[in-house]
Amino acid sequence: MDKGTKIFLTLFLTYAFFTNTYLTTNDASRFSLTAAIVEEHSLVIDSYLDTVISKWWFAKDYAVFDGRRYSDKAPLGSFLGVPVYWAFSFFTSDPAVLTYFVSLFTAGLATAATALLIYRFGAEFTENHSVRTGLALAYGIASMPLFYGTVFFSHAFTALFGFTSFYLLFMYRRRGGEKKLVFAGVSSALAVASDYYAGLIAVILFLYALEISRKKAYVFLLAFLGGISLLLTYHWAAFESPFALPYLYSNLFSKFHSEGFYGVRFLDWKKFSNLLSQLFSVWGFFFTTPFALLSFAALPRFSKTYRLETLTIIAITSG
């Protein structure tokens, strides 16, 4: 068994120990869609949302269309959970047990896979297996993915597919191969299908592909459009328009999504202070992921050889 496989299994078993059996308003919305697809072959979550959510929470994250409730989340995570829910529903109908296995075999697997990809990617920069192993494990158990690998949120899927797209584009730049562009485009689309705000990342990745090869960037774009067409089909089936995001009908639309472009807007002082808190407070990014500071410190040196990749990383991080 090679080191990459050991890293993957170690992290997956770690997540198996910590995976939640309860649902908050965020993941209850996503899980309800999974249950509705399996149990009722429907996208309407009325039968499940109030049942599956844990007693400490009340449902807020949903969209209302034609008097029926739908998930207000990007749907990829829910669809990834369908085969897991279906398989384990033969053995139990307990929502807590189903929540555990759906979360583990979606978010847990995705987070462990991302760590494995980090380990593989590290081979492009160093032959030191200890450094590569340390980076992969630091990502998996010494940062926020330790949490997001145990809950049915979108973060694990968005990270996996977003990073996969970047990795494939980097490998295409080094070694060529149009298939890498195809899979990079599809991966970027899957990231958006997991979290709509990953559309910003998809745009940056397309610009990266364009800088790598202006003649071949269309391959990435066509693959992305092919992948995103599945998301548009879901919108059409649920909301009768391919471009009707569930945020338009969200219970929380006026609070979170009405300003700017679906909630994406320029920073004012209040938003900037919130950003600083999210970055530097005891619950902030740099407190929970301290090694990220080392990554930023290494960027000047990294940029001497990989200027385009450095700009891409900065743009994605800033977005």
Image (cartoon, rainbow, N blue to C red):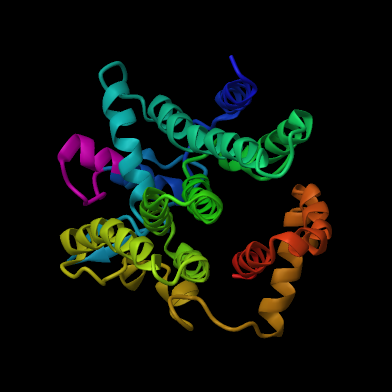
Q: Where residue 229 sits in the image (x, y, percent)?
A: 24, 61
Rendered position, 197 above or below 132: below
- Residue 62 falls left or right of residue 173: left
**Residue drawn at the location 65% of the way across and 22% of the way down:** 3
The residue nearer to you, when weighing 218 against 107, is 218
Q: Residue 294: tell me if it is visible.
A: yes
Is 44 covered by the magenta stretch?
yes
**Residue drawn at the location 26% of the way across and 59% of the way down:** 226
Q: From which residue to which does the magenta span run?
A: 34-47
Q: Quadrant of residue 191?
A: bottom left
Q: Where residue 73 sits in the image (x, y, percent)?
A: 38, 57
Rendered position, 264 above or below 179: below
**Residue drawn at the location 49% of the way across and 69% of the way down:** 200
The residue nearer to you, when weighing 13 against 38, is 13
Q: Quadrant of residue 222?
A: bottom left
Is 49 covered by the magenta stretch?
no
The residue nearer to you, when weighing 270 against 82, is 82
Q: Total marks drawn?
A: 0
**Residue drawn at the location 58% of the way across and 28% of the way down:** 15
- Residue 136 falls left or right of residue 31: right
- Residue 75 falls left or right of residue 294: left
Q: Where residue 317 sits in the image (x, y, percent)?
A: 64, 64
